[in-house]
Image (cartoon, rainbow, N blue to C red):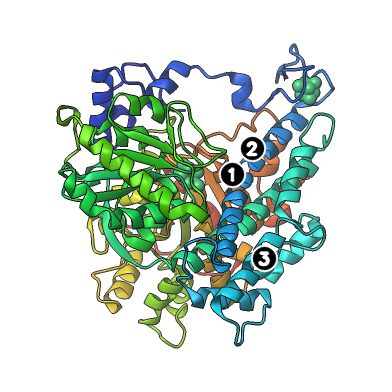
Amino acid sequence: MDQVLTPDFTGKERTIDTGAAELIDKAHRMGIETGFDRLARMLPQCGFGLLGVCCRRCYNGPCRVSLFEEGPRRGVCGASADTIVARNFLETLTAGAAPHAEHAREVALTLLEAAEGRAPYPIRSPEKLRQLAAGLGIEAEGVADRELAAAVAHRALADFQQQDGVIGWLGVHAPAEARERWDKLGVLPTNAHLEIARSATRTAMGCDADPVNLLLGAVTMGLVDGYDGCHLSSDLQDVLFGMPQLVRTRARLGVLEAEQVNIAVHGHVPVLSEKVLEAAGRLKEEAREAGAQGINVVGVCCTGNELMERHGVPLASNFAGQELVLMTGACDAMVVDVQCIMPGLAEVAKCFHTAFITTLPYVKIPGATHVEFSPARADQAAEEIVRRAIAAYRRRNPALVTIPDDTVEMWGGFTPENILGALGKVNAADPLGPLVDAVAAGDILGAVAIVGCTGFKVRHDWANTELARHLLRHNVLVLANGCGGHSLARHGFTVPGGKALEYCGASLRGVLEAVGQANGLPSLPPVLHVGSCVDNARVADLLVALAARLGVAVRDLPVAGSSPEVQSPKVLSIGAYFLSLGVDVHVGLSLQTEGSPFVHRFLTEPAGGEEPTLDALLGSTLIVESDPARAAEKILARLRHKRQALGLKEAAVASA
Ligand code: NFS
Ligand code: SF4
């Protein structure tokens, strides 16, 4: 971390969002603790933990090994720092891949229940369903949607059951060149659950101790997250809830409305949030009877992104600001499912009238009200949740309400399909042509997806937006999703023709304007918001299409992913997916691997040395850099390196 925190910080010191800052200060005045305070109290954090050399896998421990001669160099069982760091790293990735795989599996079960008429979800995109069936080799001719949906759902569930072969979703989306490389490395996954269990086994006490073997296990976890987490979730959500569309909406804490019942949906799996949104539409009259003008559903974290890209629901906050949504005093209910839900929410909710509602049998939080949700009783549960919000609204204390008076316009909902559609307006015969030409000519240096979280160690929204600014200035096309997408939306980067266009280098700006104007907009937004974290699948699909059009491997493309404000292990498992494809990944915080110089070099060093490295095996490196300006330099250097290898001409020089 770059700043020393003292507990008496001001809001502005911890976030660049003025509304969020106002509410941090309000929390201080009211004596309410948030994550910003708890981190300050936690410092200094344990040095062994930060280096990744702490192990508590068995009761001979906990062990922590020292980097210095005088300290213990091995754990009680004899595990070296290399083993301990590599095991911890793989364990973290498993903790990232597992929730994404569970997300996908639950959507698959919902699709099956819907297909069999046991859950009230229609098939909103029969086209996507048929496209998937084709990819899976399922005969669809003359088969009714529901029957086909059941067949696709069964195939999806096979990815959690089969005992040999390769997961089906990898077959649908992976490029052949990469698959061949993974096969040679012996990292292809057979079934998501099996790999997660195997990974938990190999990191258990007394199992895998070879750091390189453990790191190859990390590649497998990346493929599990990529294909059976991100792709599978995104695909089946499209079938059930429809394809995302380009939407124009608003972001920031000011999207809560004083005169309405405000319901914040928070978490990840839209199986819940879609139904809450529907029920809110049905129960408007009841809200009016309670004296409100209506019901306002706002989004937090990834489920917010999902509702945003399919229904234009406004985005209230990303991860680090989740407690601040409650600090407005105007949030009548916050309803959560799974992932990135801070237990601290319950404590903040208690200080207001807010109904804090958990919904899943395996995600309960002390102090929350639990309304059990399942696809089969989705409508009843969603109505109960909305009625609890209306009841809470009646108890709202206007004296405690502070809704920051600021919202910004944002656009989101980009997909490979609608990006190609927009490019097709420039060149209908070869939609990717204009993009490829711009990259080849150096008008666009490359592309970077800014993804993942906000947390408490980095000033909220600061690194995500700073990095974007630096990259745009160097003519890098920027995409964003997850909480990084929220950050960029919240600071005006996702508006066509907006002020952020000024950050762009001249040649990038020219391309954004040309494509935008061909589509009746002043420009494309400087940052294309592609939705939630599982929508990284869409980013990957776009890269695969681009590589195919160029006739090169994905690993050859001048592209990278970045998570400047990483907090969740999911960023690591998604990151491992992109690294597996040969795409460089930047993170803005230490991944706690420095305690093993060997492991750290494996992840971060370019190919060419004696030791094995990711770059030598897969064509990608991990870049660990907390300063956004330096991070941009390092990312740009790798993009230039890849351009050079492709024989592309020097890119245009950045404008001042
Ligand atoms: Ni991604 Fe989404 Fe946000 Fe980070 Fe958490 S919400 S799955 S993990 S914090 S981006
Ligand atoms: Fe210590 Fe080894 Fe047990 Fe880890 S597994 S706690 S290093 S004895």
Helix, strand, or loop for circle 2? helix
- 618 above or below 366? below
* Residue at the spot 48% in from the left edge and 43% down from the top edge: 337
Is residue 4 in view? Answer: no
Image coords of residue 82 (percent x, y): 75, 31
Q: Which residue is mark 1?
A: 572
Image coords of residue 539 (percent x, y): 51, 62
Of label 1 and label 3, which has the lower sequence position?
3
Q: Which residue is mark 3?
A: 154
Q: Which residue is mark 2?
A: 92
Left or right of 293 on screen, residue 380: right
* Residue at the spot 27% in from the left edge and 38% down from the top edge: 391
Q: Residues within 10 Å of mark 2 (few under 14, many from 20)?
A: some
Is residue 79 in view? Answer: yes
- Are the residues flagged by discs 2 and 1 in contact, CB closer than 8 Å? yes
In-front residue for pair 338/186: 338
Helix, strand, or loop for circle 3? helix
Which numbered disc, 1 or 3, marks the residue closer to the eye?
3
Image coords of residue 293 (percent x, y): 16, 49
- 216 above or below 557? above
In-front residue for pair 284/102: 284
Which numbered disc, 2 or 3, marks the residue closer to the eye?
3
What's the amino acid at mark 1? Leu
Of label 2 and label 3, which has the lower sequence position?
2
| Outermost residue toward the top in this view | 70
Left or right of 79 on screen, residue 585: left
Helix, strand, or loop for circle 1? helix
